[in-house]
Image (cartoon, rainbow, N blue to C red):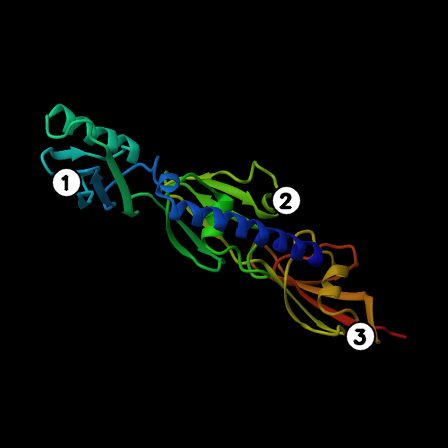
Amino acid sequence: MTQQIGSLFRILMAMLLIATAGAAMAADNPSLAGADYPLGGGDMLKITVFDHPELATELRVSEGGAITFPLLGEIKTSGLSVHELERTLARGLAEGGFVRQPQVSILVEDYQSQRFSVLGQVNKPGQYPLVTKVNVMGALAAAGGPINQVAADEATLLRRDGTHVGIDLVSLFQGDPRQNVTVSAGDTLYVPKAAQFYIYGAVQHPGVYRLERGMTVSQAISAGGGLTPRGSDRRVVVRRREYKGGKEHEASLDTADLVQPDDVLRVKESLF
């Protein structure tokens, strides 16, 4: 299981490199990155009109969702895409008799209004601009991917409206499109820390380890480096905290039993 998860993370990182490269291409090409970007308060725009350098200007969209453009005055921009605002300005310049057949170009220099967050056990947690359509894989790519051997194999997408979507990262990395849902402005993708277990006694490398999905006692012993020459996999005791009440109890385990979060496994030596 440990090797399987490691392979999945290697697959993920390859996919993240592809996704990150695509994001970089979009950032370098405004026609890809911002053409359909819905403008909002805080966005910085560089506006040019072909063959009319006197109309070139840089404007920040107000919190009320508007800009003040030369000759045209206040223009409502909130909710318009870059292309739609280009057409709006061109139409205003033409209908006002200011420019014949105007060609307006807009570059978003600072994306502020449409952002999403990636938090938790990722390499670069923080807020990111939603410059184009983004799904869960793209959001993880922006944040540098989950931290290997630390991140859990499940994540949560907290929607702006307060609803939650569970994301099975193992299925996502295996290509399940149902897990690769769209991330919208105001959403937060949270990757928690993986559950852990403790193992000590007659094992080669006692310590704290990441609890893999469906991990058995036998696999936990392998994660701890295997048995010592005197160790016995038939003499494993767990100290486990009950979900209700929080009381601890001890019990013997078989090699096929499942390990639970925060289990403390003690491997005893053989009697013979």
Find residue 257 and report its horizontal and vertical position in percent: 75, 55
Between tags 2 and 1, which lies in front?
Answer: 1
Front residue (pair 104, 37)? 104
In primary-sequence order, the first of circles 2 and 3 is 2
Rounded to the nearest angstrom, the CA distance separating label 1 from label 3 is 79 Å
- In this figure, which residue is indicated by the disc labeled 2? 174
Q: Amino acid at mark 2?
A: Gln
Q: Amino acid at mark 3?
A: Thr
* Quarter the C terminus occupies: bottom right
What element does badge 1 sit on?
Answer: helix
Find residue 163 and report its horizontal and vertical position in percent: 42, 39
Q: Is 32 left or right of 215, judged from the image as shown?
A: left
Can residue 224 be seen here?
Answer: yes
Tell me which residue sits at (34%, 40%) in the image. 34
- In this figure, which residue is indicated by the disc labeled 1? 55
Q: Is 253 left or right of 139, judged from the image as shown?
A: right
In primary-sequence order, the first of circles 2 and 1 is 1
Tell me which residue sits at (10%, 26%) in the image. 96
Front residue (pair 261, 30)? 30
Between tags 1 and 3, which lies in front?
Answer: 1
Q: How many marks?
A: 3
Q: Would you place residue 143 above or below residue 132 in this image?
A: below
CB atoms of marks 1 and 3 within 8 Å: no
What element does badge 2 sit on?
Answer: loop
Q: Residues within 10 Å of mark 3 (few under 14, many from 20)?
A: some
Find residue 215 and report its horizontal and vertical position in percent: 70, 55
- In this figure, which residue is indicated by the disc labeled 3? 228
What element does badge 3 sit on?
Answer: loop
